[in-house]
Image: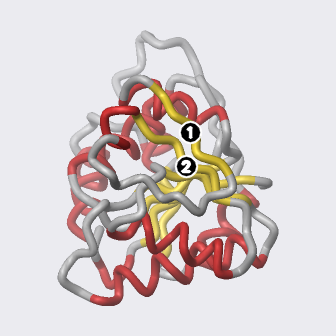
Amino acid sequence: MKSITVFCASSPGFDAIYHSTAFALGQLLAEKGIGVVYGGAKVGLMGAVANGALHANGKVTGVLPHFLRTKEISHEELTELVMVESMHERKTKMNELCDGVIALPGGFGTLEELFEMLTWGQLGLHRKPIGLLNVNGFYDSLISLLEHMTESGLLKEVNRRMLLVSDNAEDLLQQMEQYEAPEVGKWLSEETT
């Protein structure tokens, strides 16, 4: 993987471990020669990821809609800042620029981005690994929900396994390197699960 998109909060959160983990992830990716693609902001966990990578002389590409730049949150020290017109165009560009995705703790936006990438993978629109860095158990409830969806017959097991999970960044990157996307069948079939 030459570049990884990182989805995470534009807020710092209440637990300092979120910020330190975001910074450490950016640093780790840079040390491994993996470019960081992210939302382009200088604030919150987003800024921490970028700063970690920049601290280790890594390549950091931000993708930011014009309307957010006017709120003066854009990070001005990036390798590259790509300006786009909309949030949808932002996700499309971030997908184009990466070989995989990692989600850190975040709110609605992070979940929306994560699930859109998972849905695109489920539909066969990409074959990229998608990882969830489960910092301090942040995503335990989400993981339980996905298991419930699978047990309820609403999410295929093969698709649930598309989301790689670890509380350790090195382990998550190793899982991502070894990832093989499921074969996508017909959109509608006679299968019940």
Of the pair 16 and 41, the residue shown nearer to us: 41
At label 2, counting other C-alpha atoms closer than 10 Å, the crowd grade (few under 14, some 14-19, many 20 or more) is many
2 vs 1, front mark: 2
**Real-space Cα separation, disc 2 to disc 1, in angstroms:** 9 Å
Question: Is 192 situated above or below 65?
Answer: above
Determine whether the residue tagged by mark 1 lies in a helix, strand or loop.
helix
Give me the residue at 34% from left, 38% from top: 155
Question: Dot 2 corresponds to which residue?
Answer: 62
Determine whether the residue tagged by mark 2 lies in a helix, strand or loop.
strand
33 lies left or right of 149: right
Give me the residue at 43% from left, 47% from top: 160
For marks 2 and 1, the one nearer the N-term is 2
Question: Is 40 situated above or below 52?
Answer: above
Of the pair 193 and 52, the residue shown nearer to us: 52
Q: Amino acid at mark 1?
A: Met
Question: Dot 1 corresponds to which residue?
Answer: 94
180 lies left or right of 135: right
Query: Which disc, if any, is residue 37?
Result: none
43 lies left or right of 81: left
Q: Quadrant of residue 94?
A: top right
Give me the residue at 43% from left, 10% from top: 188
Residue 52: percent from left, percent from top: 57, 78
Residue 51: percent from left, percent from top: 54, 74
Question: Is 43 situated above or below 181?
Answer: below
